[in-house]
Image (cartoon, helix red, strand yellow):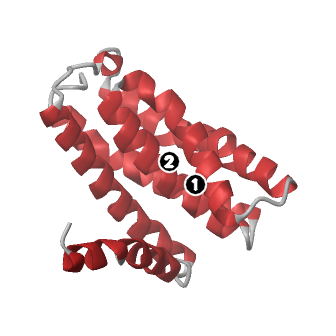
């Protein structure tokens, strides 16, 4: 690796840290919609890339979903349950043990990612790891000020994220009417 390329690559962690520090300065709603769009674009892009490089067609989990069923369970109910079990609970346990902010985010990300791998490697990495990170970061950040704010910002962001997938899955033939 050339020295200039190495210097550029070594700045990436600083850029990422600065980027997420800037999020921590935002109001709840500004944070919510921005983190949703960013996380969605990154997750969707990764899923497309992984599915292009490794076309495994392992998405049989969507066959049973109707548009209405997806809307109710994945856009409304799922984010509430997942915020409680996969963000709130792991972060609560980490906070009991006085774990640092990065440890709280990592613990919640891992717990969130695991069940998403059941839908395939693309979904596991895109929705599970990337989406899990964004949800964990959101919950851990807002939990520092309020449980309620942590819950609603994380849940609404997750609902918006899943709602953005609805037209993609519908027009892609993954959902039935």
Query: Is the C-beta separation of discs 1 and 2 under 8 Å?
Result: yes
Q: Residue at x 20, y 20 (%)?
A: 57
Query: As displayed, is residue 3 above or below residue 151?
Result: below
User: Residue 132's mark?
Assistant: 2
| Residue 42 visible in the picture | yes
Query: As displayed, is residue 164 above or below residue 102?
Result: above
* Residue 145 lies in quadrant: bottom right
Element marked by disc 2: helix
Q: Quadrant of the C terminus?
A: top left
Residue of label 1: 136
Q: Quadrant of the N terminus?
A: bottom left
Residue 97: percent from left, percent from top:
85, 54
Residue 102: percent from left, percent from top:
63, 62
Q: Residue at x 56, y 78 (%)?
A: 24
Query: As displayed, is residue 59 above or below residue 126?
Result: above
Q: Is residue 9 left or right of residue 108?
A: left
Q: Is residue 25 left or right of residue 103?
A: left
Residue furthest right as drawn: 96
């Amino acid at each position: 690796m050339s020295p200039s390329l190495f210097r550029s690559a070594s700045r990436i962690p600083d850029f990422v840290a600065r980027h997420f520090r800037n999020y921590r300065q935002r109001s709840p709603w500004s944070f919510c919609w921005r983190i949703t769009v960013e996380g969605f674009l990154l997750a969707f892009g990764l899923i497309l890339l992984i599915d292009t490089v490794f076309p495994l067609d392992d998405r049989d989990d969507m066959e049973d979903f109707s548009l209405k069923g997806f809307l109710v369970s994945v856009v409304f109910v799922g984010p509430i349950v997942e915020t409680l079990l996969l963000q709130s609970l792991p972060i609560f346990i980490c906070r009991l043990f006085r774990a640092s902010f990065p440890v709280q985010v990592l613990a919640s990300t891992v717990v969130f990612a695991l069940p998403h791998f059941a839908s395939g490697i693309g979904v596991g990495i895109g929705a599970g790891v990337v989406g899990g990170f964004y949800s964990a970061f959101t919950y851990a950040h807002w939990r520092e000020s309020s449980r309620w704010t942590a819950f609603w910002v994380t849940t609404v962001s997750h609902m918006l994220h899943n709602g953005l997938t609805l037209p993609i899955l519908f027009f892609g033939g993954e959902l039935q009417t």
